[in-house]
Amino acid sequence: MASDLEFVEYVCDQISDAGSISFRKMFGEYAVYCNGKVVALVCDNQLFVKPTDRGRLLVGNVTEAPPYPGAKPYFLVGDRLDDREWVSRLIRTTESELPIPKPKAKKSPPKDTMKV
């Protein structure tokens, strides 16, 4: 089941104190970015946060689940999503531990494969 745009916007509003928040639709679900880094996924109207060591300490008794079949487990944020301060702190902590994304390589124009 694809996530509702309204739910994604709610998630982004809840974590807006963490930094520059944005999202992008991917395969019917959504990736959530904080300061240009993918920190979470929204799948089936649930928030899945990338696992990090400091995030695990903050969460404590963490529930982990894959956001989609075949994925590695992420932290599943349940009822604590409504705690704006806590969930923003989790996203900020997660973002601080993740590496800066590498710039994408520019695509070169396709080579002409036909010889005359």
Image (cartoon, rainbow, N blue to C red):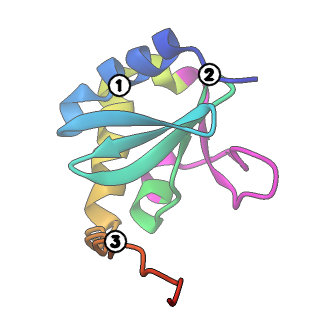
17 in magenta: no
Residue on which disc 2 sits: 3
* Quadrant in which residue 12 is drawn: top left
Q: Which sits earlier in the primary sequence, circle 2 or circle 3?
A: 2
Which mark, by number, is residue 12? 1
Q: Which sits earlier in the primary sequence, circle 3 or circle 1?
A: 1
Which mark, by number, is residue 107? 3
In the image, what residue occupies the spot 59% across and 33% down? 29
Q: Amino acid at mark 3?
A: Lys
Q: Nearer the viewer, mark 2 or mark 3?
A: 3
Q: List x then y, in percent, for residue 25.
A: 49, 34
Disc 1 to disc 2, how far (Cα)? 13 Å
In the image, what residue occupies the spot 21% across and 49% down? 35
69 in magenta: yes
Q: Nearer the viewer, residue 66 or 26?
A: 26
Which mark, by number, is residue 103? none
Label 1 CA crowd tier, 10 Å (few <14, some 14–19, many 20+) = many
Disc 2 to disc 3, how far (Cα)? 31 Å
In the image, what residue occupies the spot 76% across and 23% down? 1
Q: In the figure, 116 relative to 62: above or below?
A: below
Q: Are marks 3 and 1 in contact (CB under 8 Å)?
A: no
Label 2 CA crowd tier, 10 Å (few <14, some 14–19, many 20+) = some
Q: Amino acid at mark 1?
A: Cys
Tell me the SS state at disc 3. Answer: loop
What stretch of residues is rendered in magenta? 57-79
Q: List x then y, in percent, for residue 11.
A: 42, 22
Q: In the figure, 64 relative to 20: above or below?
A: below
Residue found at the very far right of the displayed protein? 69
Q: Are marks 1 and 2 in contact (CB under 8 Å)?
A: no
* Quadrant in which residue 91 is drawn: top left
